[in-house]
Amino acid sequence: MKKILIKTLFEKSEEFFEKKIFISAWVRTIRSSKKFGFIELNDGSCFKNIQIVYDNSLDNFEKITKLSLGSSISVHGELVKSMGKGQSVEVHAKNVEIISYSSLENPIQKKRHSLEYLRTIAYLRPRTNTFKAVFRVRSLIAYAIHKFFQDRNFVYVHTPIITSTDAEGAGQMFKVSTLDLGNVPKDENKNVDFSKELFGKATFLTVSGQLAVEPFCMGFGNVYTFGPTFRAENSNTQRHANEFWMIEPEISFADLEDDMELAEDMLKYIINYVLENAPDEMDFFNRFIDRTLLKRLQNVTKSKFVKITYTRAIEILEKSNKRFEFPVKWGNDLQTEHERFLTEKIYKKPVFVTDYPKDIKAFYMKNNPDNKTVRAMDLLVPEVGEIIGGSQREENLEVLIERMKELNMPIEEYSWYLDLRRFGTFKHAGFGLGFERAVMYITGMKNIRDVLPYPRTPNNAMF
RNA sequence: UCUUUCUUAGCUCAGUUGGUUAGAGCAUCUGACUGUUAAUCAGAGGGUCCUAGGUUCAAGUCCUAGAGAAAGAGCCA
């Protein structure tokens, strides 16, 4: 007999009603009494468990009552209307094959565990309700992002993970080396001789795919990357990991307004997609993780995001009369407390802050006529903070070179990037969405370590 | 990296101004139970109080150092 998924049983319960069915799955919890008992079974196909009813007419009844969370079984039975209150249908077991018992030392038990404890056994987390919901939704968000861009004719570009350019100085990079760390070759000045590397030069793990995706924008019009990025910073916060995924679209013949419109459409699209395709999971988050989640997300999909300039944001913060730990001053970057105040207290929804001072932003951003600010934008959302950073790019070769000189950048190393402006230039823009931050925002999970399958954070690369 | 807090049973936690044999719930084991929903009820077993030093007649509790964790900050996505 063919195995059927529990998801299918729920979706097509009419079709299978009072029919013989066969399932293989894992015990989530079991309640036994003398003559009968109930097993809640989950096969991973959906969030919900199906209830199996078994009684002492089965010849292995005693052995069945010894099952515990994590045990594997196969069940032949019949789908029937439930006599209990918690579910509409259930399976009356005709035969329960015990495939394996779970050791009683199984650290996952039928109770609430702390998220901190579960991190120490990350490889067992997929068996718990919370992480079943998190990683299902993570998968759906990834799919929704691809669908959003593919439906709009964007080309998905795989930018390299190993890179030799220290892109935009976006932070500390992990070194990639084939040299013998115990016996590093040195040149005559006693510096590391990178010419002995496999690539003939120093290489790193990428911190951003943006510079590598821009050339494809110039061949395909609209493109995006979606892949892992790495930052070697010793950041110990809820919102930072050393390995995380980023989505970076780049759009041609487009300015910052088009860029923000794209970001807003994309975020609303993926929220709607998840609400529609993972209602059980989202309901779980709303009940156990964040009681305001659904209301907030529904509000976001309906409302227009706020757009204010950096200069205006500074004015608002100055006039708020709120005491901040860090002073509000034009020219300084917005601190976390400022960002949170804007998005959580003043607007209570996502806010684009645009036109930042050029000195606190990357070299490739489009210079404004005031020569003080650049066409950059950050999207701030309640609870998570900065979720997107983007900009219109500087397409003018002379202005770009001038800026790089001001910053003492090695212009020769970026000659390939400058060529993009030499051989036909045009206005274009893009942004980077932190994938995990989007997952946090949509699930209500508060710690980035709990939305990464195997989080890489300082002192943590165990599994 | 900085600041603060935390570390007690398999898990979640309580443990008062330092004072006899360190407690509870869940889990486990034994038993009861004919519709349970984290089932319920009765009983039992289960401890290097993070580690190392110190103060004291006496330390889970106070002090010092170390390890690990969390929250906040910086950096950013």
Image: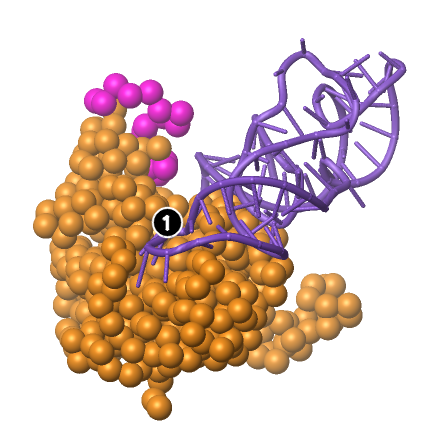
- Residue for badge 1: A445
Question: On the rendered structure, is A133 left or right of A242?
Answer: left
Task: Determine the colour of chain B.
Answer: purple
Give the image location of residue A268, x and y in percent. Answer: 17, 57
Give, as a single range, the part of the protein colored magenta.
A319-336
Give the image location of residue A115, x and y in percent. Answer: 48, 49
Q: Which quadrant of the view contains residue A102?
A: bottom right
Look at the numbered disc 1 and give the secondary structure of its residue. Answer: loop
Q: Is residue B27 above or below residue A180?
A: above
Relative depth, front residue between A366 and A332: A332
Q: Is residue A198 above or below residue A314?
A: below
Task: Determine the colour of chain A.
Answer: orange
Q: Is residue A151 above or below residue A317?
A: below
Question: On the rendered structure, is B52 left or right of B36?
Answer: right
- Quadrant of the frame with the C terminus of chain A: bottom right
Q: Which quadrant of the view contains residue A260?
A: bottom left
Q: Which quadrant of the view contains residue A131?
A: bottom left
Question: In this rendering, does residue A410 appear at all?
Answer: no
Relative depth, front residue between A174 and B6: B6
The answer to whether residue A35 is magenta is no
Residue at point 42% right, 64% down?
A36
Residue at point 55% right, 75% down?
A100
Q: For the image shown, how many numbered marks are present on the structure? A: 1
Q: Callout 1 environment at 10 Å: few (<14), some (14 to 19), or many (20+)?
A: many
Residue at point 20% right, 74% down?
A13
Give the image location of residue B23, x and y in percent. Answer: 63, 32
Relative depth, front residue between A208 and A418: A208
